[in-house]
Image (cartoon, rainbow, N blue to C red):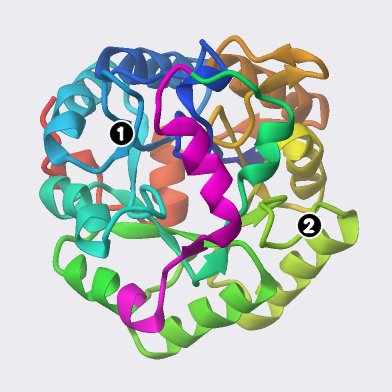
Amino acid sequence: MRKVIVTCAVTGSIHTPSMSANLPVTPAQIAASAIEAARAGAAIVHLHARMPDSGRPTQNPDIYREFLPVIAGSCDAIINITTGGAPTLTLEERLSPTLEFQPEIASLNMGSMNFGMYEMLGRFKSFEHDWERPYLENSDDLVFRNTFRDIAHILQSCSESGTRFEIECYDIGHLYTAAHFLDRGLLKAPLFIQSAFGIRGGIGTHPEDVLMMRRTADRLFGSDYVWSVLGTGRSQMSVATMAAAFGGNVRVGLEDSLWGEPGRLAHSNAEHVRRIRTILEALSMEIATPDETREMLKLKGHAATRIPR
């Protein structure tokens, strides 16, 4: 049976705490949710941090320090720290926890893009914290900055630590940018390409969009990459299922979708993991373990990180 890597994106920065009481916000909630997702079958947990009192996205390493050791000490999941954080943060803020903890994987967006979240205001009307509504409203005038210089800076800053990257590609051009940095020697094969579908400003969720991403990556990288996908909102499970059928790996979680099914919020990240695991096993596929995933992605192993257990 084919082994499929399942990544769980635990909290992210797109959704705000008022949108769902099930979104983990405090360090204890993030740790518990990540551990539960790992026990449900996620080989990788993709992690952002939030301010415990307000839920505002933060890249403060001190906040990460409250939950990373708890996760590492309770399960063997591969810890993946974002270098995206939030469009409102500076590059140095975004990069600081990866430099501090030197994880096995860090995420890295492959380009600047419009990143529209304002349409969520049509569904969510009431907010607990003062920052939430303006954060969504202002996203119609927001560019998530990731210039060539920014990307090169992140890659060069992490080159000595052995941290590899979840290369997040929100459009076809981002694949060409990844190929550019591979040619420059700043990225090393095998690339872990995470194709993202359904963000306003990026590629859509039509099956032809998914196939175009796959065909382009095959042409650019051949056998030198591992392909994974994430679909946002209601497209999370359908995009993941399509990609798995096309030979890909999958990412699910509350960062990408708050919804368990139409009209019902998901109870937890583990619910998303269990749902996609059921689908994959029904398609005669197996869930890759963390150690199998480390081998597929050529990771350095947890012992080479600075995350204590």
Q: Position of residue 156 (x, y in %)?
A: 22, 75
Among the 4 quarters of the image, the one containing residue 283? top right
- Who's the residue at 53% across and 32% down the image? 15
Q: Quadrant of residue 46?
A: top left
Q: Earlier in the sequence, mark 2 or mark 1?
A: 1
The 10 Å Cα crowd at callout 2, few under 14, some 14 to 19, many 20 or more, is some
Q: Toward the viewer: 58 or 35? A: 58
Rendered location of residue 253, percent (x, y): 56, 29
Residue for point 11% across, 42% down: 306
Viewer can see residue 41: yes
Q: Position of residue 123 (x, y in %)?
A: 73, 27
Viewer-nearest residue: 167 or 5? 167
The vertical placement of 18 against 171, above or below, is: above
**Residue range (magenta):** 128-151
Disc 2 marks which amino acid? Gly
Three-letter code, disc 1: Ala
Q: Residue at x 10, y 30 (%)?
A: 308
Query: Spatial distance from mark 2 to mark 1, Cα to Cα?
Result: 27 Å
Q: Secondary structure at mark 2?
A: loop
Residue marked by disc 2? 204
Tell me, yes or no, if residue 192 can be seen here: no
Which sits in the foreground, 235 or 112? 112
Residue linked to disc 1:
49
The image quadrant of residue 58 is: top left
Residue 95 falls left or right of residue 200:
left
Residue 177 in the image: above or below residue 249: below
In the image, is 120 to the left or to the right of 29? right
Lateral position of residue 15 relative to residue 277, left or right: left
Q: Is residue 252 left or right of residue 160?
A: right
